Amino acid sequence: MPVLTSNFLWLKAFHIIFLVTWFAGLFYLPRLFVYHSTATDALSVERFRVMERKLFVMTTIGAVLTITFGVLMVLSNPVYRQMPWFHIKMALVVLLVIYHLWCLQLLRQFAKDQNRHSHRWYRWFNEVPSLLLIAIVILVVVKPSL
C-alpha cells in the first residue's frame, strides 16, 4: 500500500487538475473536427483552424503537466511500479498520448485543407478518450488485483 505523504497529495491534486484540462481538450477538439468537416464557407473554415490550433496548445499543456505530475507521484512513491493495475494504466496512458498525437496529425490535415474523414468518422473518433478515461479511472479507484 502506498504511503500518502503531504507532498504526494499535492502532486496528486495537480495531476488530477491537469488531467481534467487534458481531457477537456480531448473531448472538445474532435468535436471541432466534426463541425470543421462540414463547414463550407471560408470564414467558418478559418475560425475552426484558429480554434483547433489554440485548443490543441492548451490541451498539450494539460497533457505535459498531467504526465509530469504523474511521473513525480511515481518517483515519490515507487511502490506503484509493483502493482499490476498500474502497468495497465500506463499502457492506456500511452494509447491516450498516441490519440493526442493523432489529433495533431488531423489538425495539420485540416490546416492544409486535406481532411480525409467525414463528420461521422469524427463522431466515432470523439468517443475514444471517453473509453480510455473510464478504464483509467476504474483502474485507479478500484485497483483490481490481477
Image (cartoon, rainbow, N blue to C red):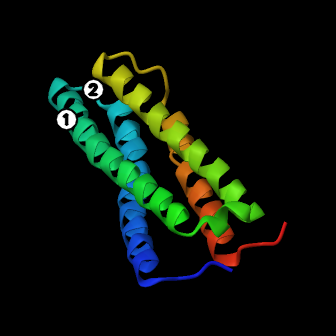
Q: Amino acid at mark 2?
A: Thr
| Quarter of the rendering containing residue 16 | bottom left
Q: Which-is-in-front pick, marks 2 and 1?
A: 1
Q: Residue at the right extreme?
A: 146
Q: CA distance from mark 2 to mark 1?
A: 16 Å
Does residue 86 appear to the left or right of 31 in the view shown?
Answer: right
Instruction: Say which residue label 1 marks.
Output: 50
Up-down relation of residue 60 to residue 143 (above or below): above
Does residue 87 appear to the left or right of 7 in the view shown?
Answer: right
Q: Residue at x 45, y 61 (%)?
A: 72
Mark 2: give few (<14), some (14-19) or many (20+) Cα within 10 Å.
few
Q: Position of residue 81 (x, y in %)?
A: 67, 60
Quadrant where the C terminus lies?
Answer: bottom right
Which circle marks residue 40 in the picture?
2
Q: Residue at x 49, y 56 (%)?
A: 71
Does residue 35 appear to the left or right of 140 in the view shown?
Answer: left
Q: Residue at the left extreme?
A: 43
Q: Amino acid at mark 1?
A: Val
Q: Residue at x 36, y 32 (%)?
A: 38
| Quarter of the rendering containing residue 106 | top left
Up-down relation of residue 33 to residue 46 (above or below): below
Q: Which numbered disc flags the more N-terminal residue, 2 or 1? A: 2
Between 86 and 16, the residue placed more toward the observer is: 86
| Quarter of the rendering containing residue 2 | bottom right
Q: Residue at x 27, y 42 (%)?
A: 57
